[in-house]
Amino acid sequence: MQIPSCLIKTQWRNRSEKGLMGTILIIPVILMALMFGSMAMDVSHVVSVRQELQSAVDAAAMAGAQSLSTDSQSVERHAREVCRLNYADGTSVDDASTPMDVSVTVVPSTVTTPGTVRVTAEVTSSNILAKLFNHHTTKVRASALAGGTGPLAQMNGTTLFPLAVSLDDSKKSLNFRPLNELHVGDTFELVINSQQYKNAAFTSFSDPNTNANWIKAAIAQSLGIPTSTSVTIPPVKVGDQISLANGVLGQKALASDPYYSALAQQEVIYLAVVEGSVPFNQTRPLVGFIGVKVNSITTNKSGGIVEQISVTLKKPLSTGIEGAVTGSTALNTTALNEMAPVSCKLLD
């Protein structure tokens, strides 16, 4: 039986129309897939850039916070220098870079309140595929706040130099003022060998079972000097009773190299602070910590024993456990808080 030609043409026409409709319908699907794919790729790129930017501002805020006390005039400069060393979206995180905007806000420290540093950075990031849909750039922003969290209440023994200094003992007739009358930046004499007066003594911290050789080995370890005798310097916290030692061997060691030069070259050494006088072979309550920079060392006439160490009071920021300084109500804790090392961390 022969099929009429009119029916054959109609069947062919229906199939062509169906094919054309299918092609028309699939084009939007392809376009949508391309759009969502480009969005996913660009979102991934933005997330990566934001992570790079966040790492940069975190590091910069911490660098600035660590300078709040030691070099308050250069806080912003230090923060920007660290920012500049980091890259986001292939660009240095620096105002000098065209697509980058960096701001630093500094709240200075006061006697009672640790300061803060906020670093904010924003970059105009070029999209990869979204620009096909007229979305050429995306602004990416990150911010970090860092600051001190209060005076250290505990320190690892390996961080401390084995010397304790009195907070309130003095001999004004010899022009020696007590520590609690001084401020950051003041020069102070650590007198460790005097028949008339001394305000500092070597300490074994919370370990009473030590001798002169222990003190010498502890000095070496704290200054990074290789020694055949290894000792364990225990961690201490505010409120502990710490042992004071004679330390003559330590005084002899510091009078000669490599100890003398190593001590003089330290940017900062950390000392335990005790209440009251510093008699040998007794204990005293630990009330806090200070950081000092050594200026000079004075020996006796024969040059064999260190008598005084001239230092400048610092307030370096250091990792530690925050907490209020404790002690008797007679102590000038405001002055101690001003001089004490404080812990520093990211606040948001």
Image (tube, helix red, strand yellow):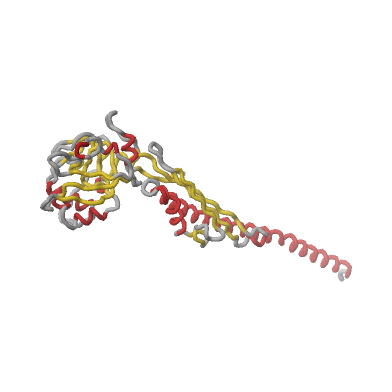
Q: Is residue 54 left or right of residue 307?
A: right
Query: 113 above or below 137?
Result: above
Query: 28 above or below 222?
Result: below
Query: In percent of the image, x 27 and y 29: which residue is there?
Result: 328
Q: Position of residue 60 (x, y in %)?
A: 44, 52
Q: Residue furthest top?
A: 329
Between 55 and 111, the residue placed more toward the observer is 111
> Residue 166 falls in which quadrant of the image?
top left
Between 160 and 113, the residue placed more toward the observer is 113
Q: Quadrant of the N terminus?
A: bottom right
* Total marks placed: 0
Query: In percent of the image, x 27 and y 49: which residue is there?
Result: 269
Query: In percent of the image, x 14 and y 45: which residue is there?
Result: 247
Query: In percent of the image, x 88 and y 70: which residue is there?
Result: 5
> Residue 147 falls in which quadrant of the image?
top left
> Residue 326 falls in which quadrant of the image?
top left
Q: Position of residue 336 (x, y in %)?
A: 31, 37
Q: Is residue 219 left or right of residue 319?
A: left
Q: Is residue 20 left or right of residue 215?
A: right
Q: Position of residue 268 (x, y in %)?
A: 29, 50
Q: Position of residue 255 (x, y in %)?
A: 16, 53
